[in-house]
Amino acid sequence: MGSGHSPSAVRRLLGATLRIVRRTTSSAGHRVRRAEIGKPLDTGGFLGASVTGWISTSPSFLPRTWWMWSANIGLSQIYGYAAGVLAGKVVRRAIAGIGLEMSIAPDHRRRARWAGAAALIGISAYSWARGVMRQREISHLVRAEPKGLSTAAVGTVGGVAFSAAALVAVRAVRSTAQLYRAMLRPYLPPRLVGGVSLVLTAVTVGVLVERLIRGRLLEQMIERAEAANRLISPDVPRPVSPLRSGSPASHETWQSLGAPGRKIVSSGASAEQIAAATGEDAQEPIRVYAGKSSARSLEETVEAVIAELDRTGAWEREVLVLFTGTGTGWLQEWSLSAIEFLTGGNCATASLQYSVYTSALSYLVDRRSPRRAGNLLLHAVRRRLKSLPPGQRPRLFVAGESLGSFGGQAAFRDLQEMLASVDGAVWTGTPSFTPLWRELVSRSREGAPAIAPILDDGRHIRVVTREADLHRNYHGGLYAEWKSPRVVYAQHPSDPVVWWQPALLWDEPRWLRERVGHDVTPAMRWFPWITFWQVAADMPLSIKASGGHGHSYHEEMVPIWAAVLGQDAGGALTLVQRRRHQAITEAIRRVHPRG
């Protein structure tokens, strides 16, 4: 049987057809792209981008680097342009709907354009200069070195370039949709052309974003995180003390601890250093840690921590503190060392690694693991403690910073269960989306500031924005007698990790309406979309702020832990206690000069 056409003839026919389609598509695509991308700026969009650009120079929590300026200006102008375009369309339709017509003479239009351009330039220069001055004010508040004018200048240029690139990208997407419509129009009914072209455009953009963001950027971040976790630094020596995980006597190998775990167990003061600082006899502190491994589950990692506590005799110490780490498993050395010095080394600290990703990456891809880690470790330890005679159990405390605070608090259903389960807790830089923090805020005494809520007159739980808040509330009022168990939420007003939340996109938070933070400029204001990105841009460098500001909790951890441990029985610090804390602070700085 034959079709009357040879295979070679069919191939020639198909090839000719494809060439025609390719030429037609290429020609149409070139015309569409040139017409769409080369269009002048929309007037409403340009005005909207200008206004949001001015607003974006307003202050936030921390001094800005050039890339923070760029991100704030660029993202704000993108939002402003879109809002301006939409507002312009609404106004034009409203004018057309009421039949209003306006006619402006050419010479008047030209004068109006020149006047408008001069006004825009003047307002832009003023807002930029005002923004630079506000940055100097913020630097003073958080004890940072002021940035030079070049930082703001480079950041502004970068922000404008970023928003321009985004506009080109959006127009490229629109030109793609128009190209699909041009291709489909000869083959589909008019009613289907728009819908099908929209679907094809969405698929095209989705594939590109998937390959760029997930296929490249996210994979590279994950690969770098895993490589950093495997890195064994020669500056981090393996401990020789059997009271440390990773030592020759430990069940956990040095390599298995991961980079953050190796740094934790190799750090810390010796018994001699503790004794020299406190003038009292001291013991060698115990530090227990288990790293993340693909060969074992999180439950098995918790069992490894329990085995290390058994091996080191941690149950015989006076104080046992369970830490939930950040995404990579990092723990704040100031908090660890404060406990060890204050207890004279008669303590054990324990933690585990549940991820190798940074806190930001963990928040995006795996928010379940920190909650499971905090929950599993606490309940495993409490089961072991119940098997010991009541008079031979160490006092149990829990702690965590940032994402570790979020994960550690997940071990409790509510605040009441936390008070019933442990002897005390220190939660540092707690993100505002943490359920127990939200409970505390919702139950706060009326009239208390949003940054320092007051629950039950501070009988058990106190929010500390600075050392003075340990024994008086934020406005200087007296608390009730501080009873055990004691819980401290340490939160700086200038810590963006604490106050950032998705709702900043559309809702003004109460803490910003009140503007009472002692290290936050009163000039900080809320604007839809813009404040969300301003605070988000503050977060990456907040850990590098001076101690006592941003996401850096340093010297204040000594008096905080002293209070939670009950070492200020009189309700306030004596002169002797203050001198002791100062000696401990200086000793920690000598042991960890880069802290």
Image: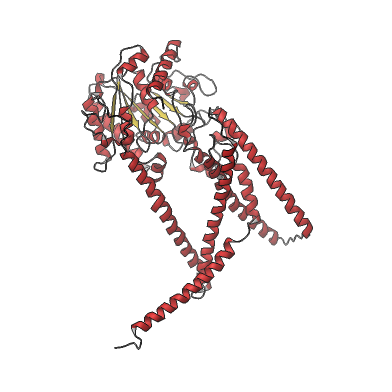
- Residue 212 position, x and y percent, is 43, 54
Quarter holding the N terminus?
A: bottom left
- Residue 418 position, x and y percent, is 37, 29
Work out whether residue 117 or residue 462 is closer to the camera in this orientation and state it.
117
Count of numbered badges drawn on the protein: 0
> Image height check: is 47 above or below 28?
above
Q: Is residue 226 left or right of residue 540?
A: left
- Residue 422 position, x and y percent, is 34, 26
Q: Quadrant of residue 588?
A: top left
Residue 570 visible: no
Quarter holding the C terminus?
A: top left
Residue located at (67% from left, 56% from top): 91
- Residue 390 position, x and y percent, is 25, 21
Q: Is residue 477 left or right of residue 402?
A: right
> Image height check: is 553 above or below 358?
above
> Image height check: is 467 above or below 498?
above
The image's colouring method is secondary structure
Residue 332 visible: yes
Q: Is residue 8 left or right of residue 166?
A: left
Work out whether residue 264 or residue 187 is closer to the camera in this orientation and state it.
264
> Image height check: is 385 above or below 183?
above
Work out whether residue 476 or residue 525 is closer to the camera in this orientation and state it.
525
Work out whether residue 541 or residue 235 is closer to the camera in this orientation and state it.
235
